[in-house]
Image (cartoon, grey):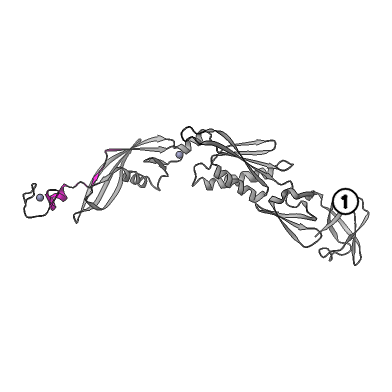
Amino acid sequence: MFCPRCGRSGEELFEGLCRSCFIKNTILLEVPDDIDVKICTRCGSYLNGTKWIKPESSDEKTLQKIMKKQIKADKTVEDLQTFIEIVSVRGTIIQCSIQAKGNVLGKMIEQEYSTEFKIEKNVCPECSKFVSGYYEAVIQIRADNRIPSNEEIKKVDEIIINNIEKLSEKNKMAYISERTEIKEGVDYYVGSYKVAKRLTTAIKDTFGGIIKESPKLMGRDKTTGKDLYRIWISLRMPYFREGDFIKYGDSIGQVISLDGRKIISKELNSINKLSILWREYNKINTVAKKEDIKKTTVTAKTPKTIQILHPDSYQPVDIEIHEKIADIGIGEEISVVEIEGELYILN
Ligand SMILES: [Zn+2]
Ligand SMILES: [Zn+2]
């Protein structure tokens, strides 16, 4: 047995060659002369196989990732390492050199290759949806028996912009394709239903209210055969706002805070605070607005009653003392609100 290349004999043969000829003969990598790369002009992601993925932190790192899918390593190579270097960029053609290092039969060998990346401008499927104005859901901002105020709409815009900015880092469908102000409020058309849900929840955390979803069948996906739905998500803000007065059962109180879960009502005739969940909204009546609060003075006091002047008629009115107003003295200026014909001292 001898090596047909160098004629040496008495050595172990690898695929018919001696070790040193085999090593010399090995080509570490199969590298295509050119590699086509599709890049999305809107988001910068590129097509890697069948998937659009985000670019890496540098062009070299991105090309490295694409290159790794295109090269084929010789099966005898172990501990293969590859490095890519951009040699030149001419228009859409990027010339690169690839250094390869690997272990063949116990010997480290190094080789260099060159390849050309051909960049093709394209639009990824998500971005083409954005470009065409596609949306999966519509958020409808409304208010119960009133129209959302300009300040409320401004705040909603702010919440949407801030959240979209964060969500779009991870989700290309996190975009607003249209915003429409109508008489009853404002509508936002959102690329993704999931994102629309997140946005609505964030808005509810600030304003409270009732969320309702109504899906509408839009047709059928021709490729998957699945029904296509669009979802309308409405957030109805409550009629009352912070500072207004509500009645829930027998309890009359002032709304001191509200969030996505509940309403906190400070009772007028006790030191109690009531926490009411939004699903109880239908059982709440708004009995006075913040603007109905008026000033008056205390004219007399007995152990059981405080006498004040009615803020409109200036007639004396006796109010039964309870723990919340026990410390008020004669001559003090106080705030009152009239609810269902009765005056309440606010404290
Ligand atoms: Zn040989
Ligand atoms: Zn894109």
Residue 73 magenta: no
Task: Look at 78% across and 55% down and name the residue there.
Answer: 253
Task: Look at 28% across and 44% down and name the residue there.
Answer: 71
Residue that extends furthest to the right in the rendered view of this protein: 315
Q: Could you say which is closer to the camera, residue 327 or residue 87?
A: 327
Q: Is residue 84 left or right of residue 201?
A: left
Q: Could you say which is closer to the camera, residue 214 or residue 129?
A: 214
What kind of element bears circle 1?
loop
Q: Give the residue type at disc 1.
A: Gly
Measured from the top left, where is residue 173 in percent x and y?
51, 41
Task: Look at 49% across and 34% down and name the residue there.
Answer: 225
Task: Look at 61% across and 49% down and name the residue there.
Answer: 202
Measured from the top left, where is residue 320 in percent x and y?
88, 61
The stretch in magenta equals: 13-35
Q: In this picture, is 194 found above or below 256? A: above
Q: In this picture, is 319 found above or below 63? A: below
Measured from the top left, where is residue 295 in percent x and y?
84, 54
Q: In this picture, is 182 found above or below 167? A: above
Query: Label 1: which residue?
Result: 341
Residue 119 occupies quadrant: top left
Q: Could you say which is closer to the camera, residue 18 or residue 281?
A: 281
